[in-house]
């Protein structure tokens, strides 16, 4: 009888099957880095992606210098030193650029940082860790970007592939570090990457086999300075694609339509407004791919009109990757959303609480408000990036009450007054905000955290903000 090896089986050298496979994958990954043409590397900013990049490059025999203004984790500092990294912490002296051939930077560091500005003058390439992930993973990447909907679409695609006889892992802006996950890919496994505009700024050779461009609207101008810079960053997702690759794009978004005309890849559109011969589309009752009906809209669990676009994009990617209609249907009949994105937290005495903390811009909040027909109490506010919120005004007409917090509370208060929101209150923290919102509500009301702002004025991440919201809701229970 032939027996399949298990993860507990010992090989001749005493290692088990699983360990041997991991070692093999590591060797394959490091061999792929022979395509990385630099030896002397500066890793600027650690965090998760910088740490992963530093370790990977050290294992590949590169000479690595790490510069981070503050490394709270002393054990990590000693670990990197023991691996051979030169550590420069506490400041950002220009001398860190001495003898450096390339920089791998934390995506959040802006390009007007003095180190990066000087590097640009010296023509030193500035990359992000995503460039390394592309080298490691090769031709098995599905990359997703857009101003809104990235996390939901990324999760849907991976779930649709894993539901059937395909296999996929998720990484990138969604949480897991791309280079770490790329090193664990098994044969025929695909890497589904959520990609921010920050990550796409430093990817001179990165080329996903399937690129997904959901939408482009004005965002992150404090980082990119101009809308054109931001648009160009998003378009980097398909800039290196060839005629053998696919570009899935939103045919209803005029900026996206204009942007993809220069793409060399095979273009696959999706639309919620028109029937398409090539691509995914929707009418009042169904979801379709070309002339093939995938399923009835009534069977989809995910709420929100905006999520139809995310679903169509995911259907395109899943179909191009070999997912079956049955796998796609099973996911859409059970998937109710990702954490912090229109996530139903609880129903307390008839009030439905939704966590949409990942809504860090106005468009996301507009779409969240459009998802509900019940009366809404909105919790909003956060980091002041210099923009006003007048575009939110039409969506506040039917909002029953609003509780504001953070740096933007006065800007949002002005818009709420002009929109004639019946009740406007201000809170100092999330516990207070939830209690105030509950006090304004009645049975069958929706209490929605959808801040329309980044979280960094009061919280380290939007996840932390959403978790605080959920704790406050459960306290009410």
Image (tube, rainbow, N blue to C red):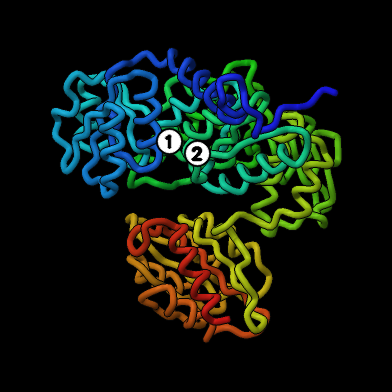
Q: Nearer the viewer, residue 40 or 211?
A: 40
Q: Secondary structure at mark 2?
A: strand
Left or right of residue 438, residue 424 in this image: left
Residue at the image point whose x is 57% and y is 37% from the top: 144
Task: Using the image, determine if residue 428 lies above or below residue 98.
Answer: below
Left or right of residue 179, residue 304 in this image: right
Q: Position of residue 32 (x, y in %)?
A: 48, 16
Cα gap from disc 2 to disc 1, whole angstroms: 9 Å
Q: Position of residue 74 (x, y in %)?
A: 26, 46
Q: Quadrant of the C terminus?
A: bottom right
Q: Residues within 10 Å of mark 1 (few under 14, many from 20)?
A: many
Residue at the image point whose x is 56% and y is 26% from the top: 15
Q: Residues within 10 Å of mark 2 (few under 14, many from 20)?
A: many
Quarter of the rendering containing residue 458 = bottom left
Q: Secondary structure at mark 1?
A: helix
Q: Position of residue 148 (x, y in %)?
A: 54, 48
The disc at residue 172 is 2
Q: Nearer the viewer, residue 224 or 210?
A: 210
Q: Nearer the viewer, residue 219 or 197?
A: 197
Of callouts 2 and 1, which one flags the residue occurring earlier in the amino acid sequence?
Answer: 2
Q: Which label sits in the foreground, 2 or 1? A: 2
Residue at the image point whose x is 59% and y is 67% from the top: 354
Can residue 225 be seen by looking at this rendering? no
The disc at residue 235 is none
Are circles 2 and 1 on residues that touch, CB within 8 Å?
yes
Left or right of residue 126, residue 308 in this image: right
Task: Using the image, determine if residue 311 lies above or below residue 461.
Answer: above
Q: Position of residue 134 (x, y in %)?
A: 50, 25
| Residue at image mark 1 | 199
Left or right of residue 28, residue 67 in this image: left
Residue at the image point whose x is 52% and y is 79% from the top: 475
């Amino acid at each position: 009888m032939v027996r399949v090896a298990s993860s507990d089986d010992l090989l001749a050298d005493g290692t088990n099957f699983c360990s041997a496979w991991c070692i093999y994958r590591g060797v394959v990954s490091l061999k792929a880095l022979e395509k990385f043409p630099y030896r002397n590397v500066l890793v600027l900013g650690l965090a998760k992606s910088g740490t992963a990049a530093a370790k990977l490059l050290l294992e590949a025999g590169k000479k690595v210098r790490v510069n981070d203004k503050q490394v709270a984790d002393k054990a990590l500092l000693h670990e990197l030193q023991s691996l051979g990294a030169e550590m420069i912490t506490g400041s950002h002296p220009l001398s860190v650029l001495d003898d450096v051939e390339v920089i791998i930077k934390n995506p959040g560091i802006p390009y007007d940082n003095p180190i990066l500005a000087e590097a640009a003058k010296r023509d030193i390439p500035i990359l992000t860790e995503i460039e390394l992930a592309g080298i490691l993973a090769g031709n098995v990447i599905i990359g997703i970007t857009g101003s809104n909907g990235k996390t939901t679409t990324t999760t849907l695609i991976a779930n649709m592939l894993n539901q059937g006889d395909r296999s996929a892992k998720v990484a990138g802006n969604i949480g897991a570090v791309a280079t770490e996950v790329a090193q664990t890919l098994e044969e025929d496994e695909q890497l589904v990457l959520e990609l921010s505009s920050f990550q796409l700024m430093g990817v001179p050779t990165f080329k996903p086999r399937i690129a997904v461009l959901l939408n482009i609207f004005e965002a992150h101008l404090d980082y990119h300075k101009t809308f054109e810079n931001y648009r160009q960053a998003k378009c980097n997702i398909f800039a290196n694609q060839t005629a053998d690759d696919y570009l899935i794009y939103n045919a209803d978004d005029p900026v996206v339509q204009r942007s993809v005309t220069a793409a060399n890849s095979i273009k696959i559109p999706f639309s919620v407004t028109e029937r398409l011969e090539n691509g995914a589309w929707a009418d009042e009752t169904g979801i379709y791919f070309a002339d093939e009906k995938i399923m009835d809209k009534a069977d989809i669990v995910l709420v929100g009109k905006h999520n139809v676009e995310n679903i169509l994009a995911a259907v395109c990617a899943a179909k191009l990757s070999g997912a079956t209609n049955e796998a796609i249907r099973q996911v859409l009949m059970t998937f109710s959303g990702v954490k912090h994105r229109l996530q139903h937290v609880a129903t307390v005495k008839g009030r439905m609480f939704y966590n949409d903390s990942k809504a860090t811009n106005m468009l996301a909040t507009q779409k969240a408000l459009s998802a509900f027909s019940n009366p809404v109490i909105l919790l909003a506010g956060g980091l002041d990036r210099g923009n006003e919120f007048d575009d939110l005004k039409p969506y506040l007409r039917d909002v029953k009450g609003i509780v504001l917090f953070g740096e933007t509370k006065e800007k949002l208060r002005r818009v709420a007054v002009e929109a004639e929101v019946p009740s406007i209150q201000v809170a100092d923290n999330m516990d207070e905000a939830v209690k105030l919102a509950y006090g304004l509500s009645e049975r069958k009301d929706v209490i929605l955290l959808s801040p329309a702002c980044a979280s960094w004025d009061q919280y380290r991440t939007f996840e932390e903000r959403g978790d605080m919201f959920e704790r406050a809701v459960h306290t009410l229970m």
